[in-house]
Image (spheres, rainbow, N blue to C red):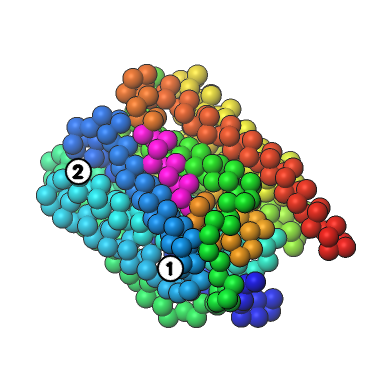
Amino acid sequence: MIKNEVKSKRNYTVPLITITLLFFMWGFITCMNDILIPYLKQLFNLTFFKSMLVQFCFFGAYFIGSLIYFLVSTISGDPINKVGYKKGILFGIFLAAFGCILFYPAATFSSYGMFLGALFVLGLGFTVLQITANAYVSLLGSEDSASSRLNMTQAFNAFGTTIAPVLGGHLIFEFFSADDGSFSAVATRIPYLIFAGILLLVALLISQVKLPSFQSEEEEIVKGLGALQYPHLLFGVLAMFCYVGGEVAVGSFIISFLEQPQVMNLNEVVSKNYLSLYWGGAMIGRFLGAISLNHSISQTKKALYMLGAAAAVFLVIFSIVDLTFSQISFFLVFIVLNFAAFFVGKSAPARTLSIFAGINVLLLISAMLNHGELAMYSILGIGIFNSIMFSNIYTLAISGLGKYTSQGSSLVVMAILGGAIVPIFQGYLADIFGVQNSFIIPVFCYVLILIFGAYCTKYLGHVKQDADAKSGH
C-alpha cells in the first residue's frame, strides 16, 4: 500500500512544475545527440553504423542502469522506496551533470571513444531520472489522470528537444566552431559545460523545494520477480523498446535524410531547423494529449483548449526555427490530423496509441517511396504522432502493478535499450541499401506498438471489469 502525505487533499502544483523543469532540461540534452551524430560523423570520418554508436552508448546506458536497478530491487527491495524519490532524482541529476563535464576532456583530446564514454555516463544519469521522475509524476494525483500528467511533463521535455537542434546546432556548428568553418571537437566543450551548470542549478532548486513523499511501508517492501506476473507489463516493455528505438532512429537520420539529393539536398545548418519541427511536433501532440486524456473537463472545453494550445505552440515553434511560414505551413495539416485522431481515440490511452502508431506506419512508407518535399513532410510528421507514445505505453504497462510499480517502472525504462539497438540496425542498412530504404526498420517498430495498443484496449478493459465486479460496482 502506498503511503503519501494526504495525497487526496494535497496540492501538487509546485512539485509538478519543479519536475517539469527537469523534464525540459533532459529533453534538451538528449536531443543534442541528433546534432552530435552528423557532427562527429564528419569529424571522425565515420560510417553510418559507427556514427550510431552515439545512440548505442547513450541508450545502452539506460539498459545497463535499469538492469542493475532491477536486480538490486529483486535482491534487497526497491531502492527508491528506501531512499525516497527526491534523493533518487538528485542523484540522477548529479550523474548526468558529470557526464556533461566529461565532454571537456573528450573534446580536448579529440577522442571518439571518450565521447562515447561521456555519453554512457550521461545516459546512466538520465536512467535514474527516468525510473524516479516518471513514476513520481504518475503518483502526483489519481491513477486515472496519470497519462494526462505525464503527457504534460513530456510536452516540456519535447520543448527541450525542439529548442536543442536550433540552439545546440548554432552553438556547435556555428558559434563555437573554428574560424575557418572546419570541424573541430573543441566546439563541444563549452556547450556541455553550460549544460552541466544548468543541471546543477536545477538540482539546487529541487533540493530547496519540499516534495511529497511516496514510499511503501517498510514491511511491505517486496523482493523477487513479482512484476513479471503481469502480461501487459511484459508486452509494454517490448512496445517501449520499439517506440524509443523508432523515435530515436528517425530523429538520428533526419539530417542525413534531408541531405539526400533525391529528397531535399540540404546542408546541416538548414536541416537542423527541420529537425526542430520533428521534435516540435512531439511537443504539440503532448500538449494536446495532456488535454485530451484529462477526464475532468467536458468535450467542448477539450476542443477549445486543444485548439488554443495547438495554435500557441505552433507560434512558439515558428518563432524558434529559422524558416519562413511557407516552409512550415504544411505542419498545419498534421496538427489537424492529430486533432482528429485524438477525438477518434475518444481519450482512451490504448486506442489512441494504436491510431497514432498506424498513422506513423503510413508516414514512414510514404517517406520511403516518395521524393522531394513529400518525402520530407512525411518523415517530419512522424514526430507529432510520436507525442503521446512514451507516456501512454509507460502508464499502460505499469497500470495496476501496486507494490510492484517501481520494479515494473525499471523494466519499462530498461526497454529504452531500443534507442541503442534500433538505430544501429538502421545504420547498418543505410550503409548497404541507402538512408531512405533503411526506414523499413522503424516501420516494424510502429506495427508492434499498434498491436500493443489493441491488446491493452482488450486486456486492461477486462481487468477493470473483473475488478469492478469483485468490488460490487
Question: Where, quadrant-wise, is the C terminus in this rendering?
Answer: bottom right
Predominant secondary structure in magenta? helix
Tell me if 262 is positioned left or right of 195 in this view.
right
| Residue 414, image x, y percentages | 46, 50
Task: Say if residue 400 shows up in the picture.
Answer: yes
Q: Which residue is drawn at 69% across and 52% down?
A: 292
Per the rendering, the mark at residue 437 is none
Residue position marked by numbered label 2 in the rendering: 112
Across the whole image, how many numbered discs are drawn on residues?
2
The residue closer to the viewer here, 95 or 220, is 220
Q: In this view, does 324 lie above or below 71?
A: above
Tell me if 367 is positioned left or right of 205 in this view.
right
| Residue 125, image x, y percentages | 36, 60
The crowding category of the residue bearing disc 1, from other C-alpha atoms within 10 Å (few below 14, some 14 to 19, many at least 20), is many
Q: In this view, does 401 lie above or below 350?
A: below
Q: Specify the amino acid type for callout 2.
A: Tyr
Task: Say if residue 152 shows up in the picture.
Answer: no
The residue closer to the viewer here, 267 or 389, is 389
Q: Residue at x 65, y 69 (%)?
A: 141
| Figure quadrant of residue 124 | bottom left
Per the rendering, the mark at residue 89 is 1
Tell me if 367 is positioned left or right of 430 in this view.
right
| Figure quadrant of residue 212 | bottom right
Start-end of magenta stretch? 413-424
Q: Specify the amino acid type for callout 1.
A: Ile
The crowding category of the residue bearing disc 2, from other C-alpha atoms within 10 Å (few below 14, some 14 to 19, many at least 20), is some
